[in-house]
Amino acid sequence: MKTTLRQLGERGLIALLKRQLPRGRDVRIGIGDDCAAVQIGRGAGDRLLLLKTDAVVEGVHFDQRATPFQIGWKAMARPLSDFAAMAGRPRWALVTATLREEMPVRFVREVYRGLAAAAGKFGVTIVGGETVRTPDRFWLSVALAGEVEPQAMKLRSAARPNDAIYVTGALGGSIAGKHLKFTPRIAEAQWLAKQGCVGAMIDISDGLARDLGHICRESGISAVVWKSAVPIALAAGRSLQRALHDGEDFELLFTVPSERSKKLERAWRKKFPRLRLSLLGFTTCGEGIRLLDHRGRMRPLDEDGYDHFQPRHA
Amino acid sequence: MKTTLRQLGERGLIALLKRQLPRGRDVRIGIGDDCAAVQIGRGAGDRLLLLKTDAVVEGVHFDQRATPFQIGWKAMARPLSDFAAMAGRPRWALVTATLREEMPVRFVREVYRGLAAAAGKFGVTIVGGETVRTPDRFWLSVALAGEVEPQAMKLRSAARPNDAIYVTGALGGSIAGKHLKFTPRIAEAQWLAKQGCVGAMIDISDGLARDLGHICRESGISAVVWKSAVPIALAAGRSLQRALHDGEDFELLFTVPSERSKKLERAWRKKFPRLRLSLLGFTTCGEGIRLLDHRGRMRPLDEDGYDHFQPRHA
């Protein structure tokens, strides 16, 4: 019997492709991190080229309630957030748009105004792309290219045991609106990289639990998260579950060696007084993530949103 | 009344976006040529970064008759052909695949085997991308990044009056099979760029008439094509119309100053004895393309395939 993609699952497919596809010698970071990083030329002052592609699809990443400007903004902001995760400097974008012929020109102009606004805010120029006619769903796919200095680049795999775990902003409930107008944390990430103390970093797209899970797996460590320390967004009601699992927060999640954490917090508050920085917990040896409550009880946190002890919120 | 995309047309849309989108200072070639070319770093030995994205869609660029390997090959070979047009050196690819859940894993593996085969043949590594589940059509979008030396880069706008016009291979009838297994002319283009005599260059994707039209418009010249000199592929029957308009030939079309043409032809035959090089005609002042028959009569050639004097073949 033939195995289908449904049976294999997305992780299975990525693992398969990772094994199947050859890896070049000039590739520093290939399939699996937020962006790919490759070595461009020898005279390039050691900088790496970062590459990322990301798509938004009608009915999946946005619906009728989104304005065309917001759709464009989101399509550009998502891969920008991946650049933030690696502390990269985004520079050029190619936009592939699949458009239906009956779309008003005005709608398409607004979409591109949203794309250009998000690009312009972070110094990115749209240098090309493609428009494709379709009878199907409306799609935007953005390919981003940019740079990073190798010593500034942040990876998912650089956390060590006994690091402090931090997150910016507040989490959960993004679907209520934030997912259409969030600000990629490019400036914050570049500032963090300059502090010289950040270990692993990732942007939260799949939800805190899953993205912290990525850091744990790729760094070969485990994490303990204080339940009461998780910053819950207003839009998430008071649901810790939503803050842990909703996703599309596009905040930065990163680790810092414990002894450097106080100093970093002080500097952060001075530099970004209006953006909350929460100390979530710490890393340790082993595997997986545990939630720690105020009575000192720990329980495992399922990455996919299933809480072993509590009924799951919708 | 609202104008729709159907009313505006594709050229109208591109012109509109070109006006609407801001152009960065580090952008050498933006929207409108085969690839975008941008300035990366100052220490990069003056090389330019080339960027290109291109998609193939089920039912548009391939159908049931194509094998999954061929679909992957074509998806990678198309943007590679754009790199050839600019005499660029492709290096890294990101692949976005929209896949249906009921697809057999084996099919998807074969698609990626085709992608990797075309990439590997030209020294390109697939460094990332994205898989998106869809209930709609199967799609592959490839974003390519690579390099070119500024003095080697070939543009559509560099033809001058009294250049000789050349085309590689034979044209027309690609739909019979060639479009699924063509070889991008990367090696030939890089060799041509080294000869130091090529003016404008483009790859034939829209058909000889249209792509020569691009060169004419962007160079501000006109072209005269000898009817009997157009190399007609076997698959096109004996139809000149098909050779002029079918498209997806992925051959190189380029110009050379007349006084350099004899020497170039000799060198070509020595270097690529198995690939035909045809002298098609010459450039001149003015606008548009004219077809010249053996009795010395000229008539205008409509880029879109409408022949003003003959009924059009299907």
Image (cartoon, coloured by chain):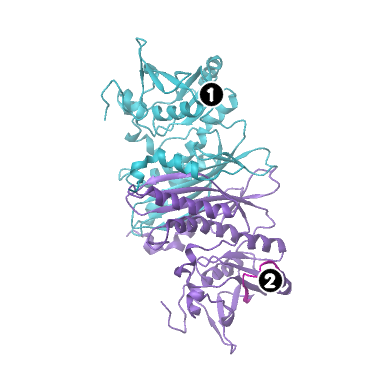
Chain colours: A purple, B cyan
Say which of B104 and B253 sits in front. B253
Say which residue label 1 marks.
B271
Image quadrant assignment for residue B287: top left
Q: Which residue is mark 2?
A: A269
Residue A309 showing in the rendered view: yes
Find the residue positioned furthest to the top.
B295
Which picture quadrant has residue A261?
A: bottom right
Q: Which region shows up in magenta?
A: A269-281
Asked if residue B53 can be seen in this view, the reply is no
How far across and how far down the image is residue A106, in percent?
40, 50
Residue A179: give x, y in percent of width and height: 48, 65
Quarter of the figure with the C terminus of chain A: bottom left
The residue most toward the front is B1
Give residue B80's mark: none
Closer-to-camera residue (A67/A77): A67
Was residue B83 drawn as part of the magenta stretch in this picture? no
